[in-house]
Image (spheres, grey):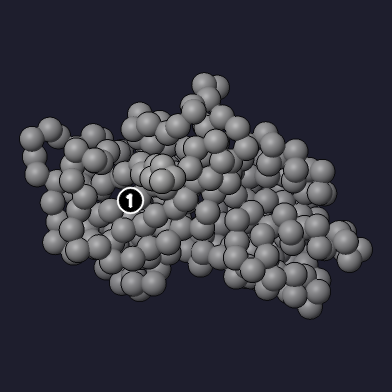
């Protein structure tokens, strides 16, 4: 399966991928996107099976990315990996169509729990 | 969960302990009293918090400490060399996650900015900072409320 990881921090993208490997999801294809606008373009061209996105990014935020995807009719499964995990943000994410929100700092278990059944 | 009207040093220290423990696998002990918390060439990361409380968190540390933090965050070995751009990125991300935790503990609708990092020639005054120990070296974290409007 193909997964897009959208985060404006290269270091954080590396950490998300390392944690996914630790959670047993190392055999999937990972495509990096440097912000929400880049992620939108890559969703169109790469046709991923899942998008993991930061919330707070330049050019296009994660929630704007999700709303733009759904607004264009794209149903790609979508989850947030973000430093902010308030109830309000979780509700906003869910209302926009996100499947889950993993708050930083995270552990492999957080990814395992959110992605089991979705990524084999 | 207790909600704060403004961040204080105890809240910020708790956030740092959580982030360092889970992402860097290091303790964040308070800096010992009476020991000068100095360094030569430093990096300073900052992030804004907006909403019911307006201000920023500022993290300042020695450049070598910043490189060690980045190396720990990336899980690199002791002999691996890390790029300066990744050091800035990593220190900004550490403060970003601390800021997210602090923001979540403040009452009301709040927003978090994007982290910024720059070189810093000297540490802030200790009395203005929460100082924690990274492997025996000081890391300063300041809570800087916006100046009241004139």
Which residue appears farthest toward the top when viewing the image? B2
Q: Nearer the viewer, residue A55 or A108?
A: A55
- Farthest-out residue, bottom: A45
Who's the residue at 53% across and 45% down the image? Answer: B50
The front one of A109 and B118 is B118
Depth check, front residue: B59 or B65: B59
- Count neighbours of disc 1 (C-alpha within 10 A) and say few if under 14, some if 14 to 19, many if 20 or more: many
Q: For the N terminus of chain B, give its image quadrant.
A: top right
The residue that label 1 is drawn on is: B59
Residue B90 visible: no
Task: Please tell me which residue lies in front, B1 or A13.
Answer: B1
Tell me which corner region of the image, top left, top right, bottom left or bottom right, holds residue A48.
bottom right
Percent across and percent down for residue B22 are 44, 42
Chain ID of residue with mark 1: B
Relative side of B139 to B32, left or right: right
- Which element carries disc 1, helix, strand or loop? strand
Residue drawn at (86%, 59%), measured in percent from left and top?
A70
User: Is A90 on the left or on the right of B32, as rendered?
Assistant: right
Res. B128 image quadrant: top left
Q: Where's residue A5, x and y in %?
A: 64, 63
Q: Position of residue B110 (x, y in %)?
A: 58, 41
* Number of marks in the rendered image: 1
Q: Position of residue A47 (x, y in %)?
A: 81, 71
- The single residue placed furthest to the front in the displayed view is B150
Question: Which residue is at 28% across, 66% downward?
Answer: B119
| Residue at left offset 34%, top offset 72% | B84
Instruction: Name the outermost residue toward the right.
Output: A73
Q: Is residue B41 visible from the viewing direction of this image?
A: yes
Q: Judge whether A63 appears above or below B18 on screen.
A: below
């Amino acid at each position: 399966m193909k997964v897009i990881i959208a985060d404006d921090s290269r270091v954080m993208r590396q950490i998300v991928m390392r944690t996914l490997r630790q959670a047993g999801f190392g055999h999937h294809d990972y495509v990096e996107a440097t912000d929400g606008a880049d992620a939108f373009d890559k969703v169109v061209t790469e046709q991923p099976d899942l998008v993991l996105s930061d919330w707070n990014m330049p050019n296009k935020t994660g929630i704007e990315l999700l709303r733009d995807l759904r607004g264009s009719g794209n149903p790609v499964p979508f989850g947030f990996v973000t430093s902010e995990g308030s109830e309000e943000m979780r509700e906003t994410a869910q209302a926009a169509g996100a499947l889950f929100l993993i708050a930083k700092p995270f552990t492999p278990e957080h990814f395992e729990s959110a992605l089991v059944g979705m990524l084999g | 969960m207790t909600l704060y009207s403004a961040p204080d040093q105890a809240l910020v220290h708790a956030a740092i302990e959580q982030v360092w423990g889970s992402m860097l696998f290091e303790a964040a002990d308070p800096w010992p009293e009476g020991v000068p918390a100095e360094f030569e060439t430093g990096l300073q990361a900052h992030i804004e918090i907006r909403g019911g409380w307006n201000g920023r968190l500022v993290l300042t540390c020695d450049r070598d400490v910043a490189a060690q933090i980045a190396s720990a965050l990336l899980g690199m070995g002791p002999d691996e060399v890390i790029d300066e751009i990744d050091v800035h990125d990593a220190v900004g991300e550490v403060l970003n996650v601390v800021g997210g935790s602090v923001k979540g503990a403040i009452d009301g609708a709040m927003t978090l900015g994007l982290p910024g990092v720059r070189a810093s020639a000297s540490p802030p005054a200790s009395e203005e900072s929460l100082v924690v120990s990274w492997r025996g070296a000081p890391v300063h974290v300041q809570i800087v409320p916006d100046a009241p409007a004139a």
